[in-house]
Amino acid sequence: MDKRSGTGICSSAQLEVRSWAEDEVAHCDFKDERLGKRFRTLLQQLTEGIGKSIPFACQDWANTKAAYRFLSNPRVSEEAILSGHFHSTRERAFLVDDNVLVLHDTTEISFKHRDGSIGLLGQIGQRTACGILMHSSLVVTREGLPLGIAAVKFWTRDKFKGTKALEKKVNPTRVPIEHKESIRWLQNLRQATELLGRPERCVHVGDRESDIYELFCAAEAAGTHFLVRTCVDRLAGDGTHTIADEMHEVCCKGLHRVETRDRGGGLREAILELKYRRIHVLPPIGKQKHYPELSLTVIHAREKAPPSEHDRIDWKLLTDLPVVTSGDAIEKLNWYALRWKIEVFHKILKSGCKVEESRLRTAERLVNLIATLCVLSWCHRPAHRSHLVIGTMEPGRDRHIGATP
């Protein structure tokens, strides 16, 4: 009988998938061994039927019913489902001798249910959007090779009306971080750092949503590092001026030529002016009694002369890592350019695995399904990069120095 026929004997590809699934979840921590066995079976079925519904992936009613029972079992949680994968992520990270980047981001997983039984995301036109929010942390090498997920947090909202009106009465900077959804950034940073070990080699990367002073302090307390895109002009120095005031005094320290994609997907070349400086940064006024002052590096990469039909590239990065030369600044820009990989991970979860098409009716079941699909979605090979480094130039010199492979 032909192994590729699928009639009685597994193909080599199926055997490879099953072997991978067994290795990836070998250290799952389920209280009942039977739950672990059922999870491995479900993972194999979903792997062989990515993007298909649970009944289609399970093939028969007995396996489908068993899958639904597993997802609704009160002894099953996202922590147990992901525990084996977290262990595998740690093992892969230990094999890397260099820095590893931990990419953080939040995504909304919406469903078409209208009764709000799952959780609320917001108002879209006349329709109430229901769904689950997920904050995940993807570990990659400095070259962008995914190593796995190090932390995931799920949550839902009970209400969303009146939040804008509340902001007019309460200064958000004076609200304790523990009372905000942004606490997830700190929780994932701590969990990922503890999981990976050797915190000094971890660099946590986030977009402008991660520009949180408490996050910077949490990284310092954990002995790890961060690299975020900043959007807040914080007090600096002796408190009589801001970061922007100091950066205005910094002269251009180098030019950096990059190739980037515009909104239409076309390629274009851009030349960025580089500025960087180590700055004494103060905490927000309402929190200066609770958090220390920090010495951080600001990197500003701004396009010198953008075409009128394109948006100017303007990146302001904040990090606790030292930046002494233009090469150091370009290295940090390249690290931040890898942040889009976690967006690809979320896209695979939604478009590839089609998690938003699930018909499960409760948040608990959906979270267990999403956690299972996370194990399948973390390893991806995207078709293109968002930013390709072409070379670098020193001021007044048009000399090609190097290229990223």
Image (cartoon, rainbow, N blue to C red):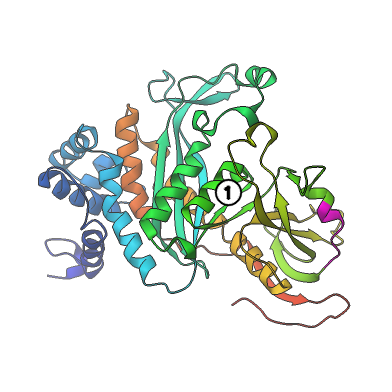
Nearest the camera: 162 or 10? 162
Residue at 23%, 32% in the rendered image: 72
Establish if 327 lies above or below 360.
below
| Quarter of the figure with the C terminus | bottom right
Instruction: State whether residue 374 appears in this view.
Output: yes
The residue that appears at 20% across and 52% down in the rendered structure is 40
Question: Which residue is at the front of the view, 52 or 370?
Answer: 370
- Vertical comparison of 283 with 277: above or below: above
Horizontally, residue 262 falls left or right of residue 14, namely right
Give whichever of 11, 84 is nearer the camera: 84
Q: Give how far across and how far down residue 107 sits, in percent.
A: 50, 41
Q: Is residue 304 above or below residue 30?
A: below
> Quick check: can you spot residue 354?
no
Residue 320: x and y in percent read 61, 58
Q: For residue 255, which quarter of the picture? A: bottom right
- Asked if the magenta segment contains residue 164, the reply would be no
Q: Crowding at label 1, few (<14), some or many (≥20) Cα neighbours within 10 Å?
A: many
Q: Work out whether residue 282 or residue 27 is closer to the camera in this orientation and state it.
A: 282
Q: How many marks?
A: 1
The residue beneath circle 1 is: 216
- Residue at x-position 64% and y-position 65%: 322
Q: Residue 200 placed where, x, y %?
A: 48, 63
Q: Which residues are magenta?
A: 246-252
Question: In the picture, which quadrant includes the N terminus?
Answer: bottom left
Helix, strand or loop at mark 1: helix
- Residue 86 sits in which quadrant? bottom left
Q: Amino acid at mark 1?
A: Phe
Query: In this rendering, would 194 be left or right of 216?
Result: left
Q: Is residue 124 left or right of residue 19?
A: right
The image shows residue 381 at horizontal and vertical percentages of 47, 64
